[in-house]
Amino acid sequence: MKKSNIILIALVSSIILAARLIPHAPNFSPLIAVMLFSGVYNSSKKYILLPLLALFISDMFIGFYKLEIMLAVYGSLLAITGVGYLLRKQKNIINVISGSLASALIFFIVTNWAVWFFGNWYTNDINGLALSFSMAIPFFKNTLVSTMLYSGLLFGVYEGAYYLSKQKKLITNK
């Protein structure tokens, strides 16, 4: 892996840590976008642990919660990284938007299913599951908006900087 990519993933992981520790609207976070971005630009699987380590460190400050639900959250984020790996070879604006939408949906489904299945807030039947998902819709709005916003920023800034650096090389080589 290029040294610049390691620095990039470390920088983006720092964004996770900072964003979770500063006050923000519920579920309005760059976390999903960062995991998607890391999947696209991280060429070594071992470095995917950096964003998860940042998440774990922030959980140490914010507070841990039921282990099974935490594992579902972390697992959904790994799945989102997998979506990023799929985007890597066919990266374009439509696929990034689609991947961002799919990632927000994966997070919503996995985490709210886990809250229903492992938690004690809802009855263990189809009505409890439906209630779990319906109560999460306001949070999903924030998840969706923040994922689209931060994905646009991360991918846009990175690709814009990459494009400009290629243009600069072309100009200086003439």
Image: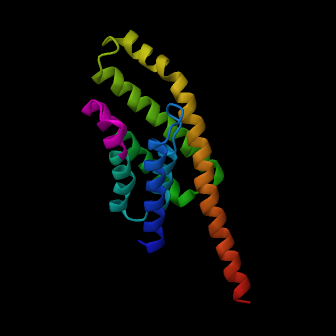
135 relative position to 153: left or right: left
Q: Mainly helix, strand or loop, the magenta region?
A: helix
Relative image position of residue 5 (x, y in whole percent): 47, 68
In this view, the residue in front, 84 or 35, is 35
In this view, the residue in front, 45 or 11, is 11
In this view, the residue in front, 93 or 153, is 153
156 drawn magenta: no
Above or below, 48 relative to 132: below
Relative image position of residue 96 (x, y in whole percent): 59, 49
67 relative position to 75: left or right: left
Residue at 49% over, 57% down? 40
Q: Tell me the quarter of the picture where residue 161 sits.
A: bottom right
Q: Tell me the quarter of the picture where residue 75 sits.
A: top left
Relative image position of residue 166 (x, y in whole percent): 66, 75
Single out the residue that lies furthest toward the left: 67
174 relative position to 156: left or right: right
Dividing the image into 4 quarters, which one contains the C terminus? bottom right
In this view, the residue in front, 23 or 136, is 23
Relative image position of residue 38 (x, y in whole percent): 46, 56
Residue at 42% over, 67% down? 6
| Magenta stretch, residue numbers | 58-73
Residue at 50% over, 37% down? 23
Dividing the image into 4 quarters, which one contains the N terminus? bottom left
